[in-house]
Image (cartoon, grey):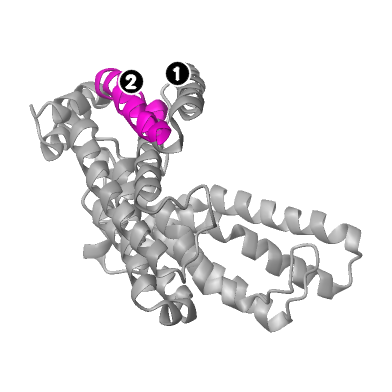
Amino acid sequence: MISDTVLEQGVVRGIVTDQQASELRMLAREISAPAASEPQDDEKLRFIAGFSDIFVTIGIGLFASAVYYLVQSFAGLGVSVIALAAISWLLAELFTRRRRMALPSIVLLCVFSGAVFLAGAFYLGDWLSGPNLDPSNEQQMIVVTISAIITAILTGIHYYRFRVPITVAVGAAAIAACLVAALFGISPRFSEQNVHIIVMIVGLSFFALAMRFDLSDPERVTRRTDIAFWLHMLAAPLIVHPVIAPLITQESSLGDATLTLGTAGAILAIFAVLSLVAVIIDRRAMLVSSLIYVGYASAALIQQVGLGDQTVMPATLLTLGAFILLLSAGWRPARAMLLKLIPSHLARRLPHPIL
């Protein structure tokens, strides 16, 4: 069977397209039948190939930190972040383009994008070492907008060069930051009053983009599934937080569950809906993002039962742990059942429609 590494290199070098690589994988599986196939994960992620990825990532962290500190000591903050971006790009030429190491590539891309944004913010506004970021400050929002545009452009060039899947999510985040900062700069009062709605719209946009990549690769064998994974990771908290956070009062805390039964029930109902969506699309990001809110609501309900303060937290953790384990064990049967309830033409486009 053709290895994924060979096919990925073929796509990177322009020998074959993503679609052709997918068809070659399917052909290789047909030829190798009836050999037993290895169990497939529902949500496979090319994150780490071996301990060498971790070892190289540690080295990158140490080397980049030393470069940043030394350059800052002699040339200042602005030059140090530019040096950090340059070092990240040069290291990516070796560990991303040549050796195709997953974890180091992700770290180098994040460092590069963050350094580019900080460099723009420093030279355009010089507020990094001064006052904190203030959304109501029009000048700061202009700086953030321009810095985000620069980051999106250079991140796009980075993707064209290295094809790291997480780059699409980082570029999308930069574009969203640009639009949101521009909106705050134009109408700060409106933006502050509707911040939850704005964040939710951004999150739903990321979710729609992620689903576009997911639906284009139902077998989850190409780079598109990795791109979709990172977009789902980006979208999930931006969807979950604006929906649930307004239900929780600012005075409440995890250590003092003061939710009413109605509010706790509403949070659990929202979580149930998110769980159905997660199972249908076969992505767990929204479940993970909402766990802290579900734990909060569960703690409030358990406290209403009359258990002592010392037993609320263990009981809450026990409830959450049991739910996660049960859902994990019944994930595939639950998907099979739910996929039968949606239109067949859509079910066929979703990941693993036949279980």
Q: Residues within 10 Å of mark 1 (few under 14, many from 20)?
A: some
The residue shown at (32%, 68%) is 182
Q: Quadrant of residue 223?
A: top left
Q: Main secondary structure of the magenta part?
A: helix
User: In the displayed image of the protein, which residue is found farthest to the left?
Assistant: 15
Residue 243 in picture, x, y percent from top left: 51, 73
Disc 2, SS? helix
Q: Is residue 318 visible?
A: yes
Quadrant showing the N terminus? top left
- The crowding category of the residue bearing disc 2, from other C-alpha atoms within 10 Å (few below 14, some 14 to 19, many at least 20), is some
Image point (29%, 56%), residue name: 146
As drawn, 349 above or below 37: below
CB atoms at circles 1 and 2 under 8 Å apart?
yes
User: From which residue to which does the magenta span run?
Assistant: 79-107
Residue 37 appears anywhere in the view = no
From the top left corner, tell me how far across and down residue 262 is, in percent: 68, 83
Q: Amino acid at mark 1?
A: Val
**Is the residue 206 above or below the residue 189 in the image?**
above
Front-most of residues 88 and 322: 88
Q: Reply yes or no: does residue 85 show up in magenta.
A: yes
- Element type at mark 1: helix
Who is closer to the viewer here, 157 or 215? 157
Residue tagged by mark 2? 95
Q: Is residue 232 left or right of residue 257?
A: left
Residue tagged by mark 1? 56
User: Is residue 18 depicted above or below 191 in this figure?
Assistant: above
187 or 311, which is in the foreground?
187
Marks 1/2: CA–CA distance: 9 Å
Q: Earlier in the sequence, mark 1 or mark 2?
A: 1
Residue at point 18%, 37% (across, down): 160
In the rendered image, residue 99 lying in the magenta stretch gets the answer yes
The amino acid at mark 2 is: Phe
